[in-house]
Amino acid sequence: MSSLSTVLCIVGTRPECIKMAPVIRALRARGRCRVLVVSTGQHRDLVAQELREFGLVVDFDLDVMRENQALSGLTARIFESLDPLLVETAPDLVLVQGDTTSVMAAALCAFHRRIPVGHVEAGLRTDDVASPFPEEMNRRVTTVAARLHFAPTAGARDALLREGVAADRVFLTGNTVIDALTARAEAVEPAPTARPRRILLTAHRRENHGAPIRRICSAVRRLIERFPDLEIVYPVHPNPNISRPVTELLSGIERVVLRPPLGYGDLIAEMKSAQLVLTDSGGIQEEAPALGRPVLVLREETERPEAVAAGAAILVGTDEDRIVAEATRLLLEADARAAMTGAGSPYGDGRAAERIAEICCAHLEGRAPVVDEFAFGGSARHVAA
Ligand code: UD1
């Protein structure tokens, strides 16, 4: 039997893959532990495709996804299928990333087996445990279960310390999404576009199911009518609560390009060729400022206030008039766009995964980590925009 420690890296959804992939690679590059990749299967198809883009494969697939899955059923299936795998592989450390149901369930499963958990992207918070639903609850539960907390920003670190997490377990690493973006962005060309103006739109969150997604679609129609030279590209999430209304309200409209979910490279290409990004996605809120693209956040609140504070993003919510007004202003005023894009990225310096790998190895080897902290100096440096 190998004397190497084992680290189990759990991913459930596509964004977790993107943000965990740099950590898996950094850990493997050190060659000091065995690194296994587990997909819960919460997003069966998207995960394998995404990992392939990073040159990674799934070692174990728990295959838990069901059509229109309910949260408790999903949680129960993860508990039942992950626990035997923890027994079989006997990891010394389990890594989770973010705030999905996969993360929360895997962290609790590991806790039940007394296996230390490292939480990548720890400490994001809103004031309301029920919003975003269920992510805010997921990340709070994960914090309680975790041993090592990798905070992407100073604000996230401070939130953990305020909640009483021991300071020697909290590490300010930056967000691994910037590592992923840095690794990929340079090689990606902007997506070809036939129109002078282009918006990239994504919306998928549970809080936007129902009336909000319909208001977002109405705003899209009004923007398309107002700007004859505008194209809006929308990669549509497969969740039927999103795909059904979006198809009903936006398919067949000229210059609205509905696309299936995009792989990471294609999404970067779309961000690069857009003048403006409208999104409710956490990852895109982090990536677009790093690429120098202004962001309108289609949510009432965000646990990523740094880009808003830096002036790179505006929280517009899902009020139809407000979306149309802000998008119109930014499409018409190059100066207003430039004021937002000069802000740079407060989320990372591309070295988060390296720091996390060192901290994990130090933990496994029972020594103090040799690591610096991520510091955002307010620089306007962009990632290969
Ligand atoms: C999930 C996460 C959310 C994350 C998002 C990223 C939870 C509760 N939600 O939301 O935090 O931001 O992923 O994408 O963890 N589906 C497919 N194929 C897929 C993926 C989803 O058909 O590849 C459909 C299925 O019908 C599934 C439904 O989408 O039942 C909902 O999936 P679920 O993972 O529960 O929620 P998401 O909205 O994807």
Image (spheres, rainbow, N blue to C red):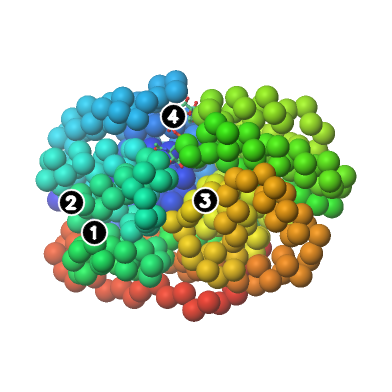
Depicted 257 relative to depicted 377: above or below: above
Q: Residue 144: x, y in percent? A: 21, 52
- The answer for how far apart the CA atoms under marks 1 and 4 are is 28 Å
Q: State the quadrant of the C terminus.
A: bottom right
Mark number displayed over residue 196:
none
Q: Nearer the viewer, mark 1 or mark 3?
A: 3
Helix or strand or loop: what does disc 4 sit on? helix
Q: Residue 220: x, y in percent? A: 72, 41
Helix or strand or loop: what does disc 1 sit on? strand
Q: Earlier in the sequence, mark 1 or mark 3?
A: 1
Asked if disc 3 is less than 8 Å from ligand 1, the answer is: no
Mark number displayed over residue 300:
3
Question: In this figure, which residue is indicated by the disc labeled 2?
Answer: 116
Q: Amino acid at mark 3?
A: Glu
Q: Amino acid at mark 2?
A: Pro
- The answer for how far apart the CA atoms under marks 2 and 3 are is 35 Å
- CB contact under 8 Å: marks 1 and 4: no
Q: Residue 184: x, y in percent? A: 57, 55
Q: Earlier in the sequence, mark 3 or mark 4?
A: 4
Asked if disc 4 is less than 8 Å from ligand 1, the answer is: yes
Report the image quarter containing ligand 1.
Answer: top left
Q: Which quarter of the picture shows residue 327?
A: bottom right
Q: How would you rate the neighbour count of disc 3 (Cα within 10 Å): few for under 14, some for 14-19, many for 20 or more? A: some
Q: Which of the pair 3/318 is nearer the observer? A: 318
Question: In this figure, which residue is indicated by the disc labeled 4?
Answer: 44
